[in-house]
Image: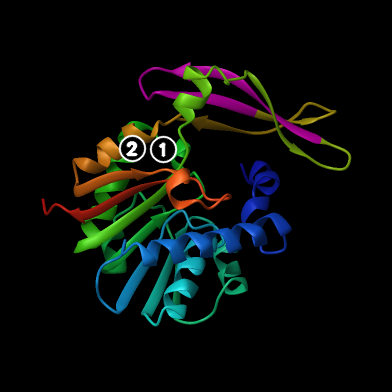
Amino acid sequence: MEELYRYLRTFMDPKSEVAQNRFIGLRSFFNWAVKENLFPERRKLRVLDLCAGTGIAGASLYETLKEWGYEASLTVVDKRKEDLLLVENWTSGEIYGAVMDCLDDLRKLGKFDVALIFGSTMPHFDPFQAAKLFRNVARVLEGDGVFLLEETDRFGAFFYRKAYREIVPEVRGEDYMVISLDEGYNPVRGVIRRGYYKLPDWEKIGEIETRYWDLAGLAGIGKALFEEARIIRKSEHGVVNVGDIIYLRGPYRT
């Protein structure tokens, strides 16, 4: 998995032009979100960025909130310490890092006003894991807290519009290409296993179990745990390099 990850992380690598453009796009989106009053109505906001990678999403929100005059703090969570250490390339200030799995009990980190999962990360979670993740988030948010989840409708794209392919070119380098192959379906967990191979030598560098989520499915899980659940389409926020957003607000207390 470490070898595979090395090839697939360009979109959040601070040295990458792709990631730098992504940061600018995220700043634009969060600027729009502030204008639309999507966040709790107080001047001090504690932000939790889950599956954060290098913290690109959390840092962009943090910088946007400061620009609007908010007093903000940022906690970034990921299983890879090497990535979390790079958050300072995006921002500096009141930032905390936690090396942990977001399926673990997040309450040890304290309470938050805003939680994020950006980067279309949900395919890594099967339905049972997704339900546990959403419940974890709901437990650490304040009563008017907000959970923003960036995703794309893979079910609609792959199956309804018939864009699914058994062989997919994933990354192209100067003298190599990484492709993924369909290697089976698990009906109990609802995931497809894809193997990743580096060409031209057909060296297997990893495999990932993937859940092809639809937006309504994720919003529906969220509605069981939050008072408000809606989907903000790209056409509504208008930022090119930011996906659709599942917006959840006001966690139920269970």
Q: Which mark is residue 156?
A: none
Q: Seen in the image, is 175 located left or right of residue 41?
A: right
Is the residue under label 2 in contact with that under label 1 (CB below 8 Å)?
A: no
Q: Is residue 144 above or below residue 172?
A: below
Q: Seen in the image, is 90 located left or right of residue 61?
A: right
Quickly name the residue at label 1: 125
In front: 234, or 134?
234
Looking at the rendered image, the quarter that the N terminus falls into is top right
Query: Picture coordinates of residue 174 (x, y %)?
Result: 87, 43
Q: Residue at x 28, y 50 (%)?
A: 248
Query: Picture coordinates of residue 74 (x, y %)?
Result: 41, 72
Query: Identity of the amino acid at label 2?
Result: Leu
Mark 1 against mark 2, which lies toward the viewer? Answer: 2
Which portion, as a residue range, is magenta?
Answer: 177-195
Residue 244 visible in the current orientation: no
Residue 242 visible in the current orientation: yes
Query: Picture coordinates of residue 29 (x, y %)?
Result: 48, 59
Which of the two discs, 1 and 2, labels the residue nearer the N terminus?
A: 1
Residue 180 forms part of the magenta stretch: yes
Residue 206 forms part of the magenta stretch: no
Quickly name the residue at label 2: 218
Dividing the picture into quadrants, the one containing residue 113 is: bottom left
Q: Is residue 194 above or below residue 224?
A: above
* Real-space Cα separation, disc 1 to disc 2, in angstroms: 11 Å
- Regarding mark 1 in the picture, which secondary structure is present there? loop
- Regarding mark 2 in the picture, which secondary structure is present there? helix
Q: Main secondary structure of the magenta part?
A: strand
Query: Picture coordinates of residue 10 (x, y %)?
Result: 68, 51
